[in-house]
Image (cartoon, grey):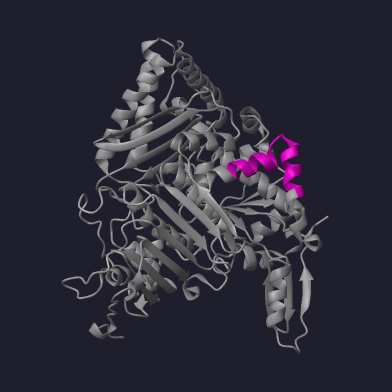
């Protein structure tokens, strides 16, 4: 078959965005859908952080399939561009890499949108978009459909207002007909931005419920820190948080506090945009905190003989919020979830070390509590080291050493293609062993319900046989000994029965992973397998349904004269090895859910409520959600 010039496809205008949306918004799932809204909100935030706006309104359509973002900034320019002979508004919304933020310091001192891509991407992926601009005493309006102008720029009359309003409806052919914006997630994200930008009032409206809420937090990050510490339900080590602002060279705001939690929780922002994957500003913060506390401990000779306090011991239990503004930020990708400016690390480290050292000297009681917290963490790390030393990395030479006896390992030693299935019960484990691909798939049967990591102490967790077998099989260690480079399986599947007991076991395992091995979840290594609950045979055809709703959808699509035979599986043990392979194990046809953490605060709060020691929180959750429960679907 010839391969010639005629086979070369040239995408023009906004066609590349519609052809490969994941390159611009990360995907067409719920996260990508919401990314459209955040692009528009961030444009309004850019107006605010440069002193041109102090009010932003976000309104969700009644069906949650569209939204409007309004600010009282300068308004997008509408005059005709001298070279392209189009109004600037149309040029910005229909052309990639068209915007006013390329020359830092001219129109924007700092900005989150730098590529001239955000607004045009939203336009390209919207079935309809309407832009209204109030500028120079005149109201202008222009409509677009799937990235192309649907009308010319029109004057609507005189006005005393100023600013920009953009209403958009994400294209259902891209995101799916059922795709909707989540009002709870939108409100929480907007509230986070109101903490970050003091002096800016953010109004959230929900057209479906009629809700209208003004979000404004004059105490900024300090107030936000208090909310996060409270939601994580781990008491602080010192009563007053450390906080400071600096606007000299690098604009920076920081608030932090040590708690009795066993993990380190950092939230960072660059030019008002959350950097979930961290970056150089987070690296500088970690180094600055470590050096400041270590310097104080050494100067006051607080470290006992024989105790080695590491950087991770110093930062254990730390909850910190860092916001920086960089004139020319280098973000990783269009989704901007990581800051890559190399010079920022040294700048943040120097400022944080100096300010925190002085604060520790002036707050002796808090400083000693923080130092004692680090010493206790160091001793706990040493005490638990013996419990994790047995974990060995999977290599071609020694990958079968020290592994649990009931683990049926795979032949491959390449973590990129190896998978581990944690299976409920020996019966299901036996079927899974027979149906698996022995080269790439390992099976570890679990005996009953595992220990609840939310209630157990670290020593109890390390001593638990089932959890210890999981850690040993994974090979990456736990706690301070965790090393992602030693992970033996690139994908870990929780394979449980589709009943209440199975759901409970899956929840217990997720609690364990979130509390003790959160890096596996954040790295996208943990999945929930989706075995079918029903088998539907129609003649020679077989359909598999995950649940009652899936069953009903399949039945509704069958011909009216069809006579389906429906079988319900009571558990994985009732499925044959071939059925389990076809539906759940085979990568070519299985269905599985990747476990992700959308919001650390909400996740931690939910786990504490549902899995913690306080029964009143669970009672409140049950009473709140009981009216919406599907009684017929309850497995009792």
Image quadrant assignment for residue 566: bottom right
Tally of marks: 0
Indicate whether 566 appears above or below 22.
Answer: below
Q: Position of residue 606 (x, y in %)?
A: 64, 44
Seen as rendered, the residue at the extreme right is 636
Relative to 28, is 261 on the left or the right? right
Q: Position of residue 174 (x, y in %)?
A: 47, 72
Indicate whether 17 appears above or below 597.
Answer: below
Q: What residue is at 40 percent from the left and 62 percent from the top?
A: 25
Indicate whether 418 appears above or below 584.
Answer: above
Relative to 515, is 69 on the left or the right? left
The one nearer the camera, 573 or 208, is 208
The question of residue 428 being in magenta is answered with no
Quadrant placement of the N terminus: bottom left
The residue segment tinted magenta is 603-623
The question of residue 622 being in magenta is answered with yes
The one nearer the camera, 238 or 165, is 165
Seen as rendered, the residue at the extreme left is 83
Q: Position of residue 109 (x, y in %)?
A: 25, 48
Q: What residue is at 67 percent from the left and 48 percent from the top?
A: 507
Q: What residue is at 43 percent from the left and 72 percent from the top?
A: 126
Can you see residue 599? yes
Q: Main secondary structure of the magenta part?
A: helix
Quadrant placement of the C terminus: bottom right
The one nearer the camera, 420 or 300, is 300
Relative to 286, is 596 on the left or the right? right
Q: Position of residue 378 (x, y in %)?
A: 49, 22
Indicate whether 404 appears above or below 302.
Answer: below
Can you see residue 478? no
Image quadrant assignment for residue 89: bottom left
Q: What residue is at 26 percent from the left and 51 percent from the top?
A: 108
């Amino acid at each position: 078959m010839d391969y010639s010039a005629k086979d070369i496809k040239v995408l023009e205008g906004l066609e590349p965005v519609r052809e490969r949306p994941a390159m611009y918004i990360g995907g067409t799932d719920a996260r990508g859908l919401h990314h459209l809204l955040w692009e528009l909100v961030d444009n309004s935030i850019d107006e605010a952080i440069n002193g041109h706006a102090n009010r932003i309104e976000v309104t969700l359509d009644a069906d949650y399939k569209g939204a409007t973002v309004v600010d009282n900034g300068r308004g997008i320019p509408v005059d005709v561009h001298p070279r392209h002979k189009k109004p600037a508004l149309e040029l910005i919304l229909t052309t990639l890499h068209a915007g006013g933020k390329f020359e830092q310091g001219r129109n924007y001192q700092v900005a989150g949108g730098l590529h001239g891509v955000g607004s045009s991407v939203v336009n390209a992926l919207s079935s309809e978009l309407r832009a209204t601009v109030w500028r120079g005493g005149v109201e202008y309006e222009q409509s677009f459909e799937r990235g192309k102008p649907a009308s010319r720029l029109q004057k609507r009359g005189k006005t005393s207002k100023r600013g920009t309003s953009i209403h958009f409806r994400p294209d259902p052919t891209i995101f799916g007909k059922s795709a909707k914006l989540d009002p709870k997630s939108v409100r929480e994200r907007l509230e986070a931005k109101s903490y970050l930008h003091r002096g800016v009032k953010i109004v959230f409206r929900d057209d479906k419920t009629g809700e209208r809420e003004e979000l404004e937090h004059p105490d900024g990050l300090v107030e936000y820190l208090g909310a996060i510490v409270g939601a994580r339900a781990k008491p602080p080590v010192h009563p007053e948080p450390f906080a400071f602002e600096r606007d000299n060279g690098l604009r920076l705001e920081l608030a932090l506090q040590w708690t009795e939690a066993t993990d380190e929780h950092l939230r960072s922002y660059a030019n008002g945009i959350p950097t979930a994957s961290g970056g150089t500003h987070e690296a500088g913060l970690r180094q600055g905190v470590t050096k400041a506390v270590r310097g104080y401990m050494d100067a006051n000779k607080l470290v006992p003989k024989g105790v080695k306090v590491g950087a991770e011991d110093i930062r254990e239990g730390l909850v910190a919020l860092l916001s920086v503004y960089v004139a020319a930020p280098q973000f990783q990708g269009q989704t901007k979830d990581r800051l890559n400016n190399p010079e920022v690390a040294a700048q943040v480290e120097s400022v944080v070390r100096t300010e925190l050292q002085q604060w520790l000297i002036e707050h002796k009681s808090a400083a000693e509590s923080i130092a004692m917290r680090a010493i206790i963490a160091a001793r706990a790390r040493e005490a638990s080291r013996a419990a994790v030393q047995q974990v060995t990395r999977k290599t071609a030479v020694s990958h079968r050493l020290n592994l649990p006896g009931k683990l049926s390992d795979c032949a491959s030693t390449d973590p990129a293609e190896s998978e581990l299935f944690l299976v409920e019960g020996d019966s299901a484990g036996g079927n899974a062993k027979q149906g698996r691909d022995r080269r790439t798939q390992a099976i570890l049967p679990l005996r009953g319900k595992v220990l609840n990591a939310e209630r157990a102490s670290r020593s109890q967790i390390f001593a638990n046989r089932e959890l210890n077998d999981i850690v040993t099989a994974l090979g990456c260690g736990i706690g301070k000994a965790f090393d992602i480079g030693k992970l033996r399986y690139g994908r870990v599947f929780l394979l449980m029965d589709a009943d209440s007991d199975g759901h409970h076991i899956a929840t217990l395992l997720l609690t364990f992973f979130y509390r003790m091995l959160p890096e596996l979840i954040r790295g996208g290594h943990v999945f929930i397998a989706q075995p079918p609950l029903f088998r539907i045979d129609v003649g020679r055809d077989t359909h598999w349904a995950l649940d009652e709703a899936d069953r009903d959808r399949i039945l509704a699509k069958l011909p009216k004269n069809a006579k389906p035979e429906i079988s319900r599986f009571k558990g994985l043990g009732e499925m044959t090895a071939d059925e389990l392979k076809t539906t759940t194990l085979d990568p070519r046809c299985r269905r599985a859910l990747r476990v992700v953490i959308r919001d650390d605060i909400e996740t931690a709060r939910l786990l504490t409520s549902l899995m913690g020691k306080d029964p009143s929180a669970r009672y409140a959750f049950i009473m709140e959600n009981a009216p919406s429960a599907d009684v017929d679907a309850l497995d009792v």
